């Protein structure tokens, strides 16, 4: 990493809430503090929904914080400013404009004369490796080439700080690797005036390949869990023992506070005791398949999460959703980057179908308050029936409409598998399968 002396970005006590109604709000980011210095690439790493992209948009001046302040070179950011540019995940190109016209857009918004716009846009297109495609339209380009246009559009305004929101996640692995390497080439060869890069990702290996510092987020609400420095020369060998050690350190940090049982302390336990706990979006078939894999002869006792992710070709979001679901249900225990099935998890995996359902039902009632709540309501109703909207309204008191709908969908899937209750999709009604 080059010498870092100048602080470019400061985030101080930043929180962000989104209004849900007249009196309710949803806290997305909570009391964040971080700095970005010249000469460094910093990665914001965390699961989807941890608020990373929201923070990036606050830094870019696209979203205002509810509390706190962000400054660029000491000046408050209250809107989009010169010196910062952003690359989006979704390419965000105008399909009716050519590559050259898309790249020129930012300069046009700044009032740059046409001749200078064209000269600077052509230079950016050449730097990013799209020379010869100036007159092409986005529909003529591959995903990787369209993202290169996004890079060129961000570079053409001559930024000091490049903000990147999961810029490689929509690309296939080979294209993403190629584009990452080109980005690092531009950075190391100093072909631009970029002094610092802040990139949002949920890809652990990508963060370790690119960043000098990795800031790990926790979720619900988004907070900074910790920071890991990557003091390895570039290009980084992903098979090197030191690199793999950093990957292990990241997994350890990301899982250190994810345990939903008493070892965590009171905060997470209290969250899980609420019916509005944000359940991981995992189908029962995925959950049972994952359990059977962990219980197979290939995996015994503690299993290294990075190794497991590689073996099963799971990205960090998929892996952590599965491990969180197993932990909540007390079928597995995660600690220091390792996962180990509990006795109940092994019993479940070894059982026949009917016994599996009994065990699953028991764990739902014991450990998932929403499942217990639904079962109690259905038990108490004379007809043992209730509209899904009745539970949706309760969930929306604690979650956004989208999140409430997702959580109810998950618990219906889990509850139907366990035969705790039945569900009529057309009528939107839950009922007891075997009312007592």
Image (spheres, helix red, strand yellow):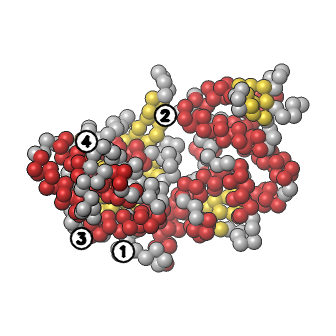
Quadrant in the rendering for residue 144: bottom left
Of callouts 4 and 2, which one flags the residue occurring earlier in the amino acid sequence? 2
Q: Residues within 10 Å of mark 3 (few under 14, many from 20)?
A: few
Query: How far apart are the two marked residues, 4 and 2, measured between alpha carbons?
Result: 25 Å
Mark 3 / mark 1, whichever is N-terminal: 3
User: Left of 6 or right of it: where is 169?
Assistant: right
Say which residue label 2 marks: 26
| Residue that carries the numbered disc 1 in the rendered image | 235
Residue 69 vertical position relative to residue 208 in the rendered view, above or below: above
Q: Quadrant of residue 412?
A: top right
Q: Secondary structure at mark 1?
A: loop
First in sequence: mark 4 or mark 3?
Answer: 4
Image mark for residue 189: 3
Pointer 2 or 3: first along the chain: 2
- In this view of the protein, can residue 6 be seen by the observer? no
Q: Residue at x 15, y 52 (%)?
A: 118
Q: Is residue 25 left or right of residue 367?
A: left
Kindly give the residue lying farthest to the bottom in the view shown: 240
Q: Between marks 1 and 4, how big is the CA–CA gap?
A: 33 Å
Residue at x-position 67% and y-position 48%: 283
Q: Which residue is mark 4?
A: 80
Proximity of marks 2 and 3: CB atoms separated by less than 8 Å:
no
SS class of the residue under badge 4? loop
């Amino acid at each position: 990493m080059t010498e870092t002396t100048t602080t470019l970005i400061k985030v101080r006590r930043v929180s962000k809430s989104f209004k849900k109604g007249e009196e309710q709000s949803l806290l997305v980011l909570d009391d964040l503090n971080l700095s970005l210095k010249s000469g460094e690439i910093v990665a914001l790493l965390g699961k989807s929904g941890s608020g990373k992209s929201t923070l990036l948009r606050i830094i870019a001046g696209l979203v205002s914080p509810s509390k706190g302040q962000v400054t660029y070179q000491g000046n408050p950011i209250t809107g989009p400013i010169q010196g910062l540019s952003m690359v989006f995940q979704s390419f965000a190109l105008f399909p009716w404009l050519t590559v050259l016209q898309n790249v020129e857009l930012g300069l046009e918004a700044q009032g740059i004369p046409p001749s200078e716009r064209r000269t600077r846009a052509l230079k950016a297109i050449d730097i990013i490796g799209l020379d010869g495609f100036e007159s092409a339209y986005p529909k003529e380009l591959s995903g990787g080439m369209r993202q290169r246009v996004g890079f060129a559009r961000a570079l053409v305004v001559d930024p000091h700080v490049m903000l990147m929101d999961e810029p490689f996640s929509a690309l296939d692995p080979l294209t993403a690797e190629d584009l990452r390497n080109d980005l690092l080439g531009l950075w190391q060869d100093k072909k631009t005036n970029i002094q610092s890069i802040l990139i949002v990702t949920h890809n652990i290996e990508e963060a370790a390949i690119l960043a000098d510092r990795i800031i790990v987020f926790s979720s619900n609400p988004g907070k900074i869990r910790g920071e890991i420095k990557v003091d390895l020369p570039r290009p980084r060998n992903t098979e090197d023992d030191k690199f793999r050690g950093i990957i292990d350190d990241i997994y350890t940090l990301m899982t250190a506070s994810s345990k939903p049982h008493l070892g965590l302390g009171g905060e997470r336990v209290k969250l899980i005791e609420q019916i509005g706990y944000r359940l991981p979006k995992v189908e029962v078939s995925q959950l049972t398949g994952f359990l059977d894999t962990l219980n197979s002869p290939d995996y015994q006792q503690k299993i290294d999460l990075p190794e497991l992710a590689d073996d099963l070709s799971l990205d960090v979001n998929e892996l952590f959703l599965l491990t969180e679901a197993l932990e909540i249900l007390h079928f597995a225990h995660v600690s220091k980057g390792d996962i180990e099935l509990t006795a109940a998890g092994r019993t479940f995996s070894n059982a026949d179908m009917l016994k599996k359902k009994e065990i699953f039902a028991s764990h739902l009632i014991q450990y998932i308050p929403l499942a217990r709540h639904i079962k109690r309501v259905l038990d108490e109703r004379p007809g043992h029936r209730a509209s899904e909207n009745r539970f949706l309204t309760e969930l929306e008191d604690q979650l956004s409409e989208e999140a409430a709908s997702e959580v109810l969908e998950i618990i219906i899937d889990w509850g139907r598998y366990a035969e705790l209750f039945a569900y009529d999709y057309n009528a939107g009604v839950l009922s007891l399968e075997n009312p007592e």
